Amino acid sequence: MKIFAVNSSARGAAQSKTKLLLDHLAAGMKEAGADVEVVDLKDKKVNTCIGCFTCWTKTPGTCVHKDDMSSELFPKFMGADLVVLATPLFHYTMNAELKKFIERTLPIIQPFFAVSGAETYHPLRHPHPGVVMLSVAGFPEISVFDQLSSWANFIYGRPGGLVAEIYRPFAEALLLPAFRKKAQDVFDAVRQAGKEIVQSWKVSPETMSRITQDLTEDSRAFLLGVGNCMWKTCISEGLTPKEMAEAGKIPRADSVESFMSMMELGFNPDKAGKLRAVMQFTFTGDGGQSCYFEIADGAIKAKKGTAEKPDLTISTPFELWMDIMTGKQDGQQMFMQGKYTFKGEMDLLMRMKDLFTA
Ligand SMILES: Cc1cc2nc3c(=O)[nH]c(=O)nc-3n(C[C@H](O)[C@H](O)[C@H](O)COP(=O)(O)O)c2cc1C
């Protein structure tokens, strides 16, 4: 089976979640014996269809443009048994790059009008390859793909046409260390989907539910907390999310709740090993609140309030601790100056930098 996969994300491989999932899908397809080629549209010159209909009249089946679409991509598209159309979800649909690519497949259609049932249509000049639609989105609800799916089913939904739809919401969280285990299962499931498509021309419901599984108990709360702190920090520091990640900066928590989420997110189970400890934070000053973290069996649980027997209690103004966490103040210096205090195991305090990574 010959498979031609088109990635329309403008981001580089290190950042693009479309590319990330497409690479896993392609790997599964290859494992099942298919001949797969992945092309990044950002590296290709694809002109906009100018609607001249030269491909329907003067040179039937051949576009007037002299670019990578005419010379390379369209012939590969026509020669494939299956095409994978991979796009980030932009404004609830495919991005402009993929739409431009699809519009340039016009020469596969003949100009004549025909009618089938309630629809007028143009017949194909050449058999259309089967289609797999793959998309990723920032929002957590699977319903964000409804419009894209509706379009894909309308246009490719004839028998054998739309082979599979692979949609992954909350995709920007896939590379966060805290979600590593579940994200790995998503990647494995996408790979499995690639195999199933080659072997049986469909994806099983079990594989699909692994692909769309929740990474966290409440992804909306996560976005409202950590997500919004991330954007606020980007704005205040004048950095894009990519620049922030490259600089190893973390979002600045703006409430006890977002601090709790951030600590859970930054927890490093490998460094914790067999550690069992309870870490209490008592925030002094205006509206002072308390929270604590239970660390056991390589996991962390954040709770509001006061623990019965904490191993370490840090009493600090909230904003000062956020300054320390985000590298604006030095923790040791602040302690020497008496800006915060601690009770209990000093060892645990010393290990904090290790236990929580950016
Ligand atoms: C212009 C633009 C529009 C977007 N529109 C949506 C949207 O409608 N729904 C959504 O859930 N995410 C939306 N997003 C978020 C992207 O789908 C998300 O960041 C995705 O991971 C990007 O894929 P990539 O990493 O392969 O580029 C949008 C992002 C951009 C830049």
Image (cartoon, rainbow, N blue to C red):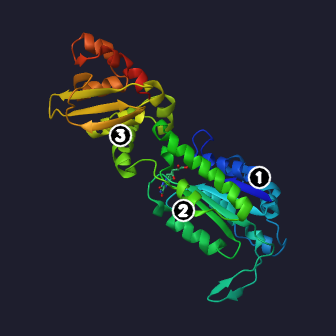
Whether the residue carrying mark 2 lies under 8 Å from ligand 1 is answered with yes
Mark 2 surroundings: few (<14), some (14-19) or many (≥20) residues within 10 A: many
Q: Secondary structure at mark 2?
A: loop
Q: Secondary structure at mark 1?
A: strand
**Image point (80%, 64%), residue name:** 78
* Residue behind mark 3: 229
Percent position of residue 255, x then y: 26, 38
Mark 3 surroundings: few (<14), some (14-19) or many (≥20) residues within 10 A: many
In this picture, residue 64 sits left or right of residue 212: right
| Separation of residues labelled 3 and 1 (CA atoms) | 41 Å
Percent position of residue 193, x then y: 64, 56
* Residue behind mark 1: 36
Q: Is residue 8 visible?
A: no
Dividing the picture into quadrants, the one containing residue 352 is top left
In this picture, residue 55 sits left or right of residue 250: right
The extreme right residue here reads 59
Residue in the foreground of this view, choosing between 46 and 226: 226
Q: Earlier in the sequence, mark 3 or mark 1?
A: 1
In this picture, residue 324 sits left or right of residue 187: left
Percent position of residue 43, x then y: 70, 46
* Residue behind mark 2: 93
